[in-house]
Every structure is written in structure tokens, then in C-alpha cells.
Image: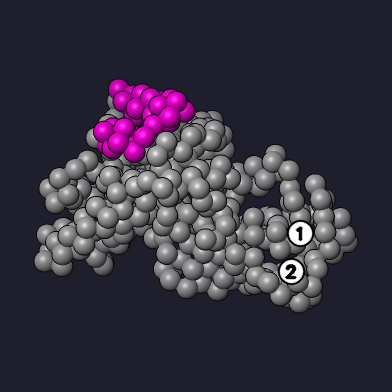
Amino acid sequence: MTTDAVDPARRLTPVVRVAPAKLNLTLAVLGTRPDGFHELHSVMVPLDLTDRISVSILPPGSSDTLHVDGFDPGPLSENLVLRAIAAARRAARPAWGRAEPPPALAARLEKRIPIAAGLAGGSSDAAAAADAALEAWGVELDGESRRRLASELGSDVPFFLAGGPALVEGRGERTTPLAWLRDGDDAHDRPGVLIVTPAVGISTPAAFAAWDAGARVVGGAARLASAHLADELRKGLGVADLLARASVLAAANDLAPAASIVEPGLVPFKRALLRLLRRPVGVSGSGPTHWALYPSHAEATAAAEQLRGSIAVGDLPSPGPRDPFVAATRILARTNDPRRER
Ligand code: C5P
């Protein structure tokens, strides 16, 4: 661990991080643990769809502040960014080594990832905010302390420390980095991802409670598909190989039936989406985000345009008070560090 003083340049220059959304290509729920959490086996990838966080040091005597633009994430007092800064401050104390705690921060969050959508936007913001806070204070934590801080903040947070595709196990705290797609860099066409998020938040605890109450698929197909994909990524998978597996992956989410119990409107929604897109449609996390893979960003963009047209004429029955959020994005390129702004 190392500590610097907070030098004057740091006080003036905000530290900026991008916080990518994640997509569950697979999500197997293996069982309920004694602590009430669920044992998972999931292959996750970061997306180009990102929030942006910046933090600047405030004068002595201030408290942490947060300003949010974009999607409304709900009460600021419950925002994971402020909790992440507070937890990072506690974790930084030994390395900081002074009587007074590391200084207060002014955080700004540009929220472009839909909220409570199965894309882990809040968890990614937390990981990015903790990382930015530590850099603003000039404190470096060792790997173990970082992992502990991340799991304390939430089950989805440790994934964002992996900085790329990862196999996620346990309640989310065990992450094993997986290889990027062989040709998934800026020199090639990366897979395009169409994201369609109905305007209803699904609470993760509610989805797991529905799973506990019996909303599940028997047979373990998601577990098999998940293990298989993790193996294939380890060995080196190309974009075309991933697309060829789209229908298996789209079916490999054990929380999808639970999400439809929590929000029954997802059943006609998915049926209509399948009819409109004519390709496999999966669910990310506990929903309600649905996804479809395309060979390129251009094709995902064309599909998004077409879908917006269908929505405008009422062809996609979607739960919630507003039209769904529709975005064409990509799996993040291996050449990009997801945490640094490009
Ligand atoms: O860890 P996090 O606060 O994100 O989890 C929110 C809730 O989701 C937990 O309280 C728990 O109900 C549920 N959960 C679970 N098993 C997991 C992850 C989350 O049951 N692996």
C-alpha cells in the first residue's frame, strides 16, 4: 500500500471514470445459501453503454456531495456512489495514515444506464466511484482490500474489478477473468448488442424471492450452457462463434421465469419482441432488460431504429408508464480499459 499527500493539482483536477453496464450472457442459479444469498454461475461481459463519474476534492469541513444528470436514480441518500465513497474512505484509512479521514468529495454522475434494469449500472457506478475516490486521495489498496471493498458494496460490484469478460460465482464475489472475444477489438467488428428495457424496475430481491417460491426451470440447462461458454471463452471464441450460440445463451437465464412472475407484462413483451426481431432474445440479470446479439454495431443500430418504429405504432406491448429504452451498443473492446475515459 502506498500513500501520497493530496497534492494541489489533485484538488483541482477531477478524477473521471466510465462505468460500463454489464450483460449476463448466461445466469445459472445453483441454490440458496445459508446466508439467504444465491449461489450463481454466470458469464458476464461489459458493454459500451456507460455511466460517467467524476470526483473532485472539497475543502476541509465539507461533506460528500452527489449531483446526477440523466436517468433519475432515486433518493440520493440511498445512492451507491455515496456509499462507495464512504466505504472507500474507511478502507483507505490504514494507508492514509493520518488522524483526519481522507477529504470529502464532490461526485458527479451522468446516468445513461437504465436503473434497476439487470445491467448493474448502480454496481458499476459504485466500483467506479470507489476507484476514483482512491485515486483522488492518492491511496492504493492491494488486490484483496479492493475485492473486500467491492463485495461489501454489492454482489455485482466485484465483476467490475475484472475489467473484462468474467465468470462470476458464489454470490458474485468470486470472479475469474475470461479471454476477450478473439476478434472482439477495435480492428474488427465487435458483436452489436440491442438492449430493450421496459420502463419497469425489477428489484433483485423480489426476483430471487420468486425463484425461491418456485419460479424456476428444472434440468440445469443454464448451468451447462454457462460452464460451456466459460470454457469456450477460455479457449478462445470468435464473434461468429458467439453469435452461433445465441439461442442457447438466450435461454440460459434461470432468473427469467422469476422476472416474469414479478412483472407478468414481460411475457407478451418478449413474445412480441421475438416476432419483431426474429432472432434469439435473452434477459440480463433479473431483468427487465432484454438483449439480442448482432454481428456488428451497424446491424444492431438498424434493428434499434426499426424497433423504435414498431414501438411508435404500438406493435410492442411493454409494461410500464413509458416506452421501453432501446439502445444499440457493443461488447466492450479488449483494447479499452473500461474504467478510463476514452
Ligand atoms: O448484493 P446485493 O445488495 O446487490 O443484493 C441484493 C439482493 O439480491 C440481496 O439482498 C439478495 O436478496 C439478492 N441476491 C441473492 N443472491 C445473490 C445476489 C443477490 O439472493 N447472489
Q: Residue at x 52, y 38 (%)?
A: 172
The amino acid sitting under disc 2 is Arg
Colour mode? Answer: one colour
Residue at numbered disc 2: 10
Measured Cα–Cα span from mark 2 to mark 1: 9 Å
Q: Is residue 228 above or below residue 299?
A: above
Mark 2 and mark 1 in contact? Answer it, CB < 8 Å. yes
Report crowding for label 1: few under 14, some 14 to 19, many 20 or more residues within 10 A (C-alpha). some
Q: Residue at x 52, y 61 (%)?
A: 342
Where residue 82 sits in the image (x, y, percent)?
61, 63
Residue at numbered disc 1: 138
Name the foreground residue: 182 vs 274: 182
Q: Main secondary structure of the magenta part?
A: helix
On the picture, is 77 further left or further right than 61?
left
On the image, which quarter does residue 328 sit in? bottom left
Region in magenta: 219-246
On the picture, is 293 further left or further right than 38?
left
On the picture, is 335 further left or further right than 274?
right
Element type at mark 2: helix
Looking at the image, the residue that sits furthest to the front is 187
Visible residue check, residue 238: yes
